[in-house]
């Protein structure tokens, strides 16, 4: 009873700390903290102050990731990484990413000086959202060694390159290679708010992510003929907007009839865009996601063929461009089963799910076994000041994290695993 009260206090402190970090913002009155912005430095200073009394050494690596190491019982032991991102979108909430940095610090505190067979490295990634440079995961990509020169030349709205931003912050781009993880990393675990309504709908506190969905992003352009809306009979039209509407309905039908598939046309532009003119051209976005690449690719192929059929029978042309084709990333089956057990021990029935959004774990999974634990997101609201978490859910997440550390500490199978296994 006492122990559970302690965890609840601990959860309240986690929430209060997320709120404290929310004060470090580029904007007055709302949260925005982008890659290597001045408030990121204040955020690092605050967190370093929290972890120092726990015997944790912290440093900022060459791409601005905050790296905090809680030592193992013995020197030269392998390490477990736990983390998430410290950057935010504009007008953000206080928990997306940040919770996944603050919560593992609470786990270190709860260990109360007890050392495990492995070190624990808590990472606060410098960029996951991709707001400043229009490309996400700058922080985690440095850890897997995929931050190349092309990316470093990318510029923000002010014409400052990533390389220059790193130098301006007082860091050395020549040391980026040293930010990469070594072979002694046993795995990566991430706590993150779900950012969706699934757990709330299922009345669960925690979700166990089995896979991060693959994504296709495309752009479609239907080209017909613009003409007078009053004088052109219906049978003599080549209406690009009507064609788009027919196709959008089919996109929704395909997703509704395929288990686990989500497909979205989120943007549409019609030209010339006047009430009394038949649209001559429409440009549409398409976003398709699924945990299985075959299912996603089959849906995309079908929707491309369908767009061509719709265009042909209406006497139009259609063009499509692929903007993104990101493979699905399964989480590590061993870690997933360990998380399931830990969730059960925390008093929750494990709820397996697919993450529709990308997370740092998706990048880390290229090199090490990875797992993600979702926390219920009230109202499914995120990327918004109304973003929240429940104390009870954070309490269960802490309990789950402590059970997970205990399980992994006594698992010879886990400690035998090495990076690239
Ligand atoms: Zn996030």
Image: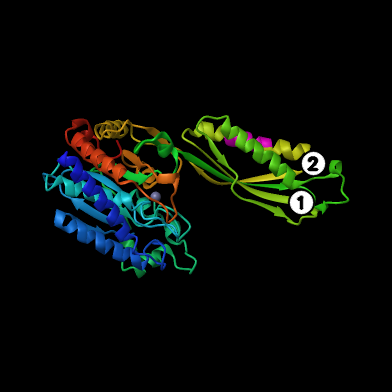
- Name the residue tied to disc 2: 315
Residue 151 coordinates in the image, percent (x, y): 44, 57
Q: Is residue 129 visible?
A: yes
Majority secondary structure in the magenta region: helix
Image quadrant in which you'd find residue 28: bottom left
Residue depth check, mark 2 versus mark 1: number of the one nearer the observer: 1
Q: Is mark 2 within 8 Å of ligand 1?
A: no
Q: How are the residues colored?
A: rainbow
Q: How many marks?
A: 2
**Image-based side of 163 in relation to 284, left or right:** left
Which region shows up in magenta? 299-306
Measured in 3D between alpha carbons, the distance from the residue under mark 2 to the one under mark 1, in whole angstroms, is 12 Å
Residue at position x 20%, y 40% from top?
4
**Image-based side of 396 in relation to 363, left or right:** left
Residue 379 coordinates in the image, percent (x, y): 44, 45
User: 122 and 234: which one is in front?
Assistant: 234
Q: Is residue 178 visible?
A: no
Q: Secondary structure at mark 1?
A: loop
The circle drawn on residue 280 is 1
The circle drawn on residue 25 is none
Residue 297 coordinates in the image, percent (x, y): 55, 35
Residue 413 lies in the magenta stretch: no
* Label 2 neighbour load within 10 Å: few <14, some 14-19, many 20+: some
Residue 302 lies in the magenta stretch: yes
In primary-sequence order, the first of circles 2 and 1 is 1
Q: Is residue 252 shown above or below 238?
A: above
Residue at position x 85%, y 41% from top?
235
């Amino acid at each position: 009873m006492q122990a559970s009260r302690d965890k609840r206090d601990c959860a309240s402190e986690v929430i209060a700390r997320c709120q404290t970090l929310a004060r470090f913002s580029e904007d007055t009155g709302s949260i925005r903290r982008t890659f290597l912005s001045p408030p990121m430095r204040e955020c690092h200073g605050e967190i370093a102050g929290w972890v120092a009394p726990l015997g944790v050494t912290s440093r900022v690596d060459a791409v601005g990731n905050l790296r905090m190491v809680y030592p193992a019982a013995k020197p030269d032991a392998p390490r477990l990484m736990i983390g998430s991102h410290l950057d935010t979108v504009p007008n953000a909430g206080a928990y997306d990413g940040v919770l996944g940095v603050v919560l593992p610090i609470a786990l270190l505190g709860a260990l109360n000086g007890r050392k495990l067979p492995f070190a624990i490295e808590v990472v606060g990634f410098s960029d996951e959202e991709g707001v400043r440079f229009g490309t996400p995961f700058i922080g985690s990509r440095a850890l897997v060694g995929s931050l190349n020169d092309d990316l470093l030349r990318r510029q923000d709205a002010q014409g400052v390159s990533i390389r220059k931003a790193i130098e301006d912050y007082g860091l050395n781009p020549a040391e980026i290679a040293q930010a990469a993880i070594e072979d002694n990393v046993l795995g990566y675990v991430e706590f993150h708010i779900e950012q969706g309504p699934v757990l709330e709908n299922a009345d669960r506190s925690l979700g166990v992510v089995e896979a991060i969905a693959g994504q296709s992003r495309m752009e479609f352009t239907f080209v017909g003929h613009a003409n007078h809306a009053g004088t052109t009979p219906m049978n003599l039209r080549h209406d690009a907007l009507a064609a788009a509407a027919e196709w959008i309905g089919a996109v929704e039908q395909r997703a509704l009839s395929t288990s686990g598939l989500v497909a979205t046309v989120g943007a549409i532009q019609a030209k010339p865009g006047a009430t009394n003119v038949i649209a001559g051209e429409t440009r549409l976005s398409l976003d398709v996601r699924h945990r299985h690449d075959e299912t996603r690719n089959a849906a995309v192929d079908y929707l491309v063929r369908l767009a061509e059929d719709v265009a042909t029978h209406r006497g139009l042309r259609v063009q499509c461009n692929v903007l993104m084709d990101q493979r699905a990333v399964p989480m590590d089956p061993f870690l997933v089963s360990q998380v399931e057990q830990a969730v059960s021990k925390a008093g929750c029935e494990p709820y397996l799910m697919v993450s529709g959004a990308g997370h740092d774990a998706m990048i880390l999974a290229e090199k090490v076994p990875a797992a993600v634990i979702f926390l219920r997101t009230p109202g499914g609201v995120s990327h918004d000041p109304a973003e929240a978490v429940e104390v009870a859910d954070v309490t269960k997440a802490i309990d789950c994290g402590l059970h997970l550390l205990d399980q992994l500490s006594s698992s010879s199978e886990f400690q035998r695993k090495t990076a690239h296994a």
